[in-house]
Image (tube, rainbow, N blue to C red):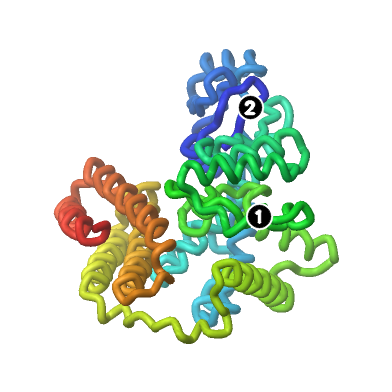
Amino acid sequence: MYILSNGVKISEKAHQRLCQAVKDTSRKHVYFLEMESGKLIRVSRANHQKFAAMRRESQRFIPLPRVSEAERRKRFVVFVEELGIIDVPELQKRLSKEIKKGASLEILEQILKPSGWIHGWVQDEQFLLAERIEEWITAPPLNARDDPDYWYDDDCPICQLMRKTEEENCSPNIDEMKTAFKKAEEQGAWVGEKLPEESEAEEESKYIGRAKDFKMPKWMECTWRRVPCGKDECPICGRIKRDHQRHIEKGENPDDLKSVFEDVGRNFKEALEMVKKDAENKGFNITNIENIKEPPEPKEFPLYGEVEKWNKSVTVLGDMAQVLGEFWIHTEAAADLFWYANTLMAKTYRQLCNRWHIKNGDDYGKFDHRYTGYILKECLKILKKSLRELLENNQSQKTELNSLLSKLLKLEKQIIK
C-alpha cells in the first residue's frame, strides 16, 4: 500500500497490523516500525534495556502513534447518532443513555454486539485507525508515498499507461492511448467499440479497459473487506472522508440528518449517471431496465438456506461465548469470523442471482459473476483461517468451532462451483 522514503514497501497485511497496534491502549508495550525491513516491532515496557537501545536508534526505529480510547469512544458516539437514521431508535436510545452515564467503550460495544451493528462499528473504527496511520506514515521521517503496484495491474497496457501518467503528473495523449488500446486488444481485451476522438479522450479514459483477465480496481475491496484502506486516493474511503471534511469547512455538522441525506443523494445521483452511461455504452436502454427478469427471493435457493443456517450457528456461538465471558470473541480471528460470515451469506445470494440470470439468457449477471466468485473465495479463505486459529487457542468451545469448520468445508464446494 505504501513505499517508505528508503524504498521499503508496506503491504496491505502490514498495514492491517499497524492499524491494530495503534489501538493498543494497555500501556504494556511500545510499538515501532523498523525502517530497514518495514516490520512492526513490539517491545515490552518492562524490558528497559531493549526499549532504551531502540530509542537510541531513533532514525531506524520509528514509534507508532496511539489512538486513545477517548478518541475511539468519540467516534463511537458519532456512529451511535447515525443509528437513528437507519431506523434502530431503541438501540440508539439505550446506547445514548449509557454514553451519558460515562460507560466505557468496551461496555458500549457489548450492548451493540447482539444487534449485529457491531460489524458496522468495527469497519467505522478501522477508518479512524487507517486515517491515523496515513497521517503518521506520510509525514517525516517516513515520508511514505502510495505504492502504484497496489492500485494498478501491471499486465494491463491501459493500467500501465495510467500508472505512467500519474507518476509523471501528466495526461495521456491520443497516440499513447491508441497504442495502449491496440496492445490491450491484442491481449484479448474488450476496450469499447472505438477509440474516442481527442476531445473525448479524457472523459472516455475513465471507462476503458476490461480484459479477459480483468481485475476489479483494488479500491472495490473497501466495499466488502472488514478493514478498508482508509486512503484519501480511494474512491470509497476518500469520498467518505471528503464529504466529512467538506461539511466541517462549511461550518456544518457532518453527522446531522441534513448533511447525511445530502451526501447520500449526491452519491446516488452520481452512481445513477455512471449506470446510465455504462448502459448506453453497451447499447442498453436504461428506460427498459424493468424488462430484466427479477431473480427469485433468497428463500427459493436451497444453498442460500444452508448458508443462512450456518451463519445463524456462528451468531449463536458468539452469543454463547459472550454469556460465558470467553476471551476469544475479542480477538482478530473472531472479528473476521463474524464479519465474513455475514458477507458470505450476502454474496452467496448475489452469486445465485448471477447464475440464475445467466441460466435464463440474461447477460446481466455475467460480468458480476466473476468478481463475486473472487469475493466468495476470499471470504471462505479468511473464514477457514479464522476458525482454525480459534480452534488452536480455544478449548471450552472447541466442539462447536470444529462443527462450524466442518460444515463450512462441505458448503464450500457448492458455493464456489
Which is in the foreground here, disc 1 or disc 2? Answer: 1
On screen, residue 145 versus residue 382, left or right, reads right
Provide the secondary structure element on which disc 2 rests: loop
Residue drawn 53% across the image and 41% down it = 156
Q: Quadrant of the N terminus?
A: top right
Q: Residues within 10 Å of mark 1 (few under 14, many from 20)?
A: few
- Amino acid carrying label 1: it is Lys
Which residue does the numbered mark 1 point to in the structure image? Answer: 206
Q: Position of residue 291 (x, y in %)?
A: 46, 85
Q: Nearer the viewer, residue 297 or 164?
A: 164
On screen, residue 270 versus residue 221, left or right, reads right
Q: Nearer the viewer, residue 71 or 369?
A: 369
Q: Is residue 21 visible?
A: no
Indicate whether 26 appears above or below 98.
Answer: above
Q: Nearer the viewer, residue 291 or 384?
A: 291
Tag on residue 4? 2
Provide the secondary structure element on which disc 1 rests: loop
- Amino acid carrying label 2: it is Leu
Q: Position of residue 360 (x, y in %)?
A: 31, 77
Residue drawn 55% across the image and 39% down it = 150
Q: Position of residue 125 (x, y in %)?
A: 55, 55
On screen, residue 200 versus residue 302, left or right, reads right
Residues at discs 1 and 2 in contact (Cβ within 8 Å)? no
Q: Is residue 290 visible?
A: yes
On screen, residue 249 versus residue 289, left or right, reads right
Residue 241 sits in which quadrant?
bottom right
Label 1 vs label 2: CA separation? 29 Å
Total marks drawn? 2
